[in-house]
Image: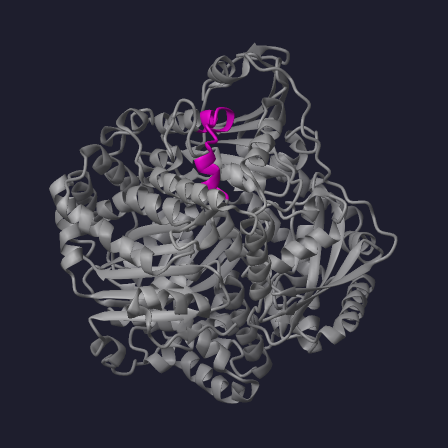
Amino acid sequence: MTDLTINIGDEIGGFQLEEIDTLNDYKGKGYLFKHVRTGMQIYQVVNDDRERFFSYVFKTNPINDSGVAHIIEHSVLSGSERYPLRDPFMELAKGSANTFLNALTYPEKTLFPAASPLKKDFQHLFEVYTDAVFAPLLREETFLQEGVRLSCDEKDNFKYEGVVFNEMLGDFSDAGNVVFSQLTRTLYPDSLYSYISGGDPKEIVSLNYQQFKSYYSQHYQPTNCCLFLYGDMEIGENFEFLNKEYLASRSMLQSSPLKLESAPWDAPRCATIDCPKDGSNGSSVLLAFSTCESNNSLDVLSLACLVDLLIGSTGTPLYKAMIDSGLGEDVSNLCGMSSDFYQMPFILGFSGADPDNAKKIEDFLLSKLKDIAKNGFDPEQIKGTVKRQLFKQKEIAGGQPRGLLALRRSMRGWLNGESPSSTIQYGPVLDELVAQLEKNPRYFEDWMSEKLINNNHRLLLTAIPSEAFAEKQKKVIESKLKATTSLLTKEDILALKENTKKFEEFQKKGDNKEALETIPHLHIDDLPQDIIASTSVKTEDLGTTIYRFEEPTNGIVYVNYALHLEDLSMDELILLPLFSSVMDMAGVGDMDYIEVNTKMKNLMGSYQQVLEVGEKVDQNEVVCLLGQAKILNEGVDEALDFIVQLLTKSHMDDLERIWAAIVDSKGIYASNGTYNGHRLASIAASSVFSTPTLEVENLLGVTQWRFLSSLKKSDMKRISQKLIALQHKIINRDRLEMHITCDKENMESNYKKLHTFIESFPVFEREKTIEKNYPEVENRKVTSVKALTLPSDVSYTSMVIKGAGLDSEENAAQRVLAALMTGNELWQIVRGQGGAYGVDCYVENLERLVVFTSYRDPHIASTFETYKKILEKYSTTYSESKLIEDAVISNVSNDLRPYGPAQKSLIDFRRILYGITNDIRRASRKSILSITTGDVKDAARHLLEEKDVSYAVLTGPQKLDEEKQKMPLLDVQPCELPL
C-alpha cells in the first residue's frame, strides 16, 4: 500500500472520489468512488492485507420462480468476448493460487467474489471476471447447459436437464431448504423475497433463452453494479482499465428497483405447507417474526446478541424451556436470524412436533418471551454474550478472506442506497451497544418487547413432512413435459433430436488452442519454492508433551489438547460423538448446564471438541478427542481450570441431557444429509480399506447416524452407564498431548499455567491396548459397493481406489493427476455434459486413497464409467506440460492461504499428531514441483491396475432401481438413511 494524496472531488480513471473513511476495524481507509458517466460505484478498502479481494455486485431482483438470476450467475462465467472459452472459470481456477473464487446468488443481489495473496494472480482474476460480467457471450448452448433444456433421444424419450435445474432438484429434496424458502416467501409476500431466487424446478422448466437474455440486459448494467476492492493495492488501481475497456462507451441507465420492504401486518398470520421428510417423527412448527432493517447495524448486533441469549446454546433460558416443554423432539435447526434479508427474520420453533399443537406452541413461545422480558436476563449471561462479541472484535480473523466479511457487512447499507461505510465496521457498533447497556440495563428486554412480543408481523408456519412431496414435484414437472411435447409435430421432434445432437457435440467439443491461450495463468516460477515451515517447539511437563507455537495473536491464547484413544474398542469408539455432545449439553459438578453455559461464555471466546481419526504418515493409527479453546490472555488460569472440571465432572448420568444430545445430533445429520451427501458417500466407500477408515465411518458417517437413530429413551440408563465408564477411562493424564499458541511476550507465563492444568488430570495405568481386527476390513471383497437411499431425484456418487502415502513420490503424481482430472475431463463430462452440480477428485494423503465424488448428479452408472474412462485416457496419453503446470499450481496454492492464528494453531497441532514434519512437507513440495508427464501417466496406470476399488452411491430408491439396469454392480441391498 502506497500513500497517495487524494481529496474528495478528485478523479481517477473516470471515477470521482465522494468519501474517505477511517476504518479502524480493517486497519486502513475506505474510499467511495462514483463513475461520472455511468454512476457505477466502487468502494475500495486500502490496507496491508496481502490477501487481496474484489467482488462485483449486481442488484438482481427476481421477477418469478424461474431462477433466471441464478442461471445467469452460472452463465456469465461460461465464456466472454476476450476469453471465448466454454468455461473460462475452470480454466482460470486451474492456473491460479486463488484463496476464494466463486459466484453467489442471493434474493436481491448476485456476487462475483475472488481473492488471492499473489498480486499477479489477483490481476488475472480481476481481468477475467470483469470481462465475464460486462461482456459475456451468453450462448444459447450455455443457457441449455447451465439452466435447463428439453432433450430427446432416438427412442423419443423426452426429459429436462441442466446444471441449475439439477441443483435445485437437490435443494427441493432437502426439508430445511423447502421450509425456510416457504417461510420467508410467506412472511414477506409483497416483496421480492416472495420468490425463490435459486429457482423452483417446476418453474425453471418454463424459462426460455429470450427471457434469459432479456434479464441480463436489464440487470447487468454498470449503473446497476457496485465493485468492492480490499487489501494491499494502490488507491484507484484498475480504474483506468475498467473505464477504458468497459465503461467509457456506456451511459447511465435507470438502476433496477428493489422491492425489499414488506408492508407491516395488522394481525399475525398462519400457514401450513408440505415438505420432504427430515428425519424427525413429526412436523416442524415455526414462529417467525419480521423484526427490523439490516441497514441498522445496532439492530443487527442487538438481534444477534438476543439469539445468543435466548437460543444460542442448550443452556440458555428459552432453549431449556423449549426442550423441557415436550412440545417437539428438538429445537428446529432453522431457529435464529438472518441479516441477508432487508427485514431480518427471527425464527423460533420445533422439529418433530404434533401439527395439532401449532397454536399451543405459538402461545408457549410468546408466553416464554414475555416471561423473560418481564423477569430479565441474568446479568452474567448478558456479560458473557457481550464478552463473546468483544472477543470476536479482538481476534485476528481467518478461515475466509477478510475482504468477504467486509463486503457482506458493507452491502447491508450500500444495497439500500446508503454509504458502505455506514455498516462496514463492527467496533463502533459494539461500543454503541455497550453504551446502551450502561444507560439502560434492560436494553435487550425492551428491544425484545418492541421488536418481537408486540410485533404483529409474525407467522406461525406448520410444515408437514410428506412421503409424496418428491413424487408430487416430479408429477408437476412430468405434466409440463407432457404438455410441451404433446404439441410437437413430427418435424418438431426431428428438429429437437437434431438440436440435441448438436448440443451434445458442443459439449464434447473442446476449446481450440487460441481460445485457451487467452486465459492468463501463473507459472511455477511465480510460486514460492519452499514451504512455510512450522516453528513450534517440543517440550515436556509432568510427562506430558507440549508444543509451543509463537505467533502474533493480539492478546489471545489458543490452547489445543488431544486425548489419545487408540486403544478403545469399536463399542467404546462409537459412543465418542455422543460423549462429546453430552459434555457440551450437561451440567458440571454443582453447576447445572445453564450455569455451565454462562460461565463458558464469560471465560472463553469459544471452546469445542472434535474427533480426530486417521492414519499417521508411518501408518500407525490416530484416534483422539481434540479440544480447542480460545482464551483472552488475562483469563487463562480460570478457563483451564473450568476445562478440567468439564472433562472430569460432566454429568454423564443426566438421562434427559443424554436424550437431548441424541435428538440434537440426529437433527444435524438429517438437516445436512443432502448437503453432505457426497461426503457421506465418500466416507462409506472409503470405510472398507483400513481400520481408521472404518472407524471414520462408524464415528462420522451413516453408521453413526443409524446408531443414534436406533436409540430410544428407554435405552438411556444403559447408555449413561457406558458414558460414565468411558469418561473414567479416557480422562487420564497418560493420554494427554498439548499445544499452545500465543504472542511471544506472553508465551513463558502462559506456558507455566499449563502445569496446573496437567496436574489436575487423574493419573492411572492404562489397560492393555486391544488388537483391532474388524471383519469388514479383513474379509472384504476386492470390489466393494454400498448403496444409501433417501428421498431424492439426484445422486451423490463416490469411487475410491487404493493410492500411495504422503511420504512417497507417487503420492505427488497422484495429487497432480487428481487436479488434472478435476479441472479438465471430470468437469467437462460429469458436470458440463452430465449436468451434475459438482464433481471432484482428490487424494486422502494419510489414508492412501484416491477419491472421486459427484454432487447432485442426475446420473450414477455413466458417472462411474466416466471416472474409469478418464483414468484410462491418462494411463495411455502424455498430458501437455501446460496442463501439468496448472495442476502443480493448484496443489501448491493450498499452502499459500493466509490463515488466522486460530487456524494456524490447529493446523500445526494436527500435523504433529499425524507425523507430518517439515522434512516430509519439503520433500512433498519438491516432488510436486518436479512432476513430469510420464509420472502422471504412470500414476494413472497404477490406479487403473489397482484391484482395491470401492463404490458408494446416495440416491433415491427409484433412481437406484433405474441405474441397476445400466450397472449390475449396483444391485446390492440398499441401506435406507433414517429420514
Q: According to the image, what is the colour scheme of the structure?
A: one colour
The image quarter containing residue 975 is: bottom left
141 is within the stretch colored magenta: yes
Residue drawn at x 40%, y 22% is: 82
x and y percent of residue 804 in the render?
A: 18, 57
- Picture layout, residue 745 above or below residue 947: above
x and y percent of residue 151 in the render?
A: 45, 48
Q: Which residues are magenta?
A: 129-147
Q: Give the overall secondary structure of the magenta segment.
A: helix
Residue drawn at x 67%, y 56% is: 182
- Quadrant location of the N terminus in the rendered image: top left
x and y percent of residue 595 in the render?
A: 63, 69
In the displayed structure image, the side of residue 139 where residue 664 appears, left or right: right
Total marks shown come to 0
In the displayed structure image, the side of residue 84 where residue 162 appears, left or right: right
- Picture layout, residue 703 above or below residue 925: below
296 and 516: which one is in front? 516
641 and 966: which one is in front? 966
x and y percent of residue 319 in the render?
A: 67, 68
Residue 397 in view in this figure: no
515 and 344: which one is in front? 515
913 is within the stretch colored magenta: no
- Picture layout, residue 629 above or below residue 504: below
In the displayed structure image, the side of residue 717 where residue 300 appears, left or right: right
Residue 848 in view in this figure: yes
The image quarter containing residue 40 is: top right
User: In this view, which residue lies farthest toward the right?
Assistant: 266
- Picture layout, residue 424 above or below residue 473: above
The image quarter containing residue 314 is: bottom right
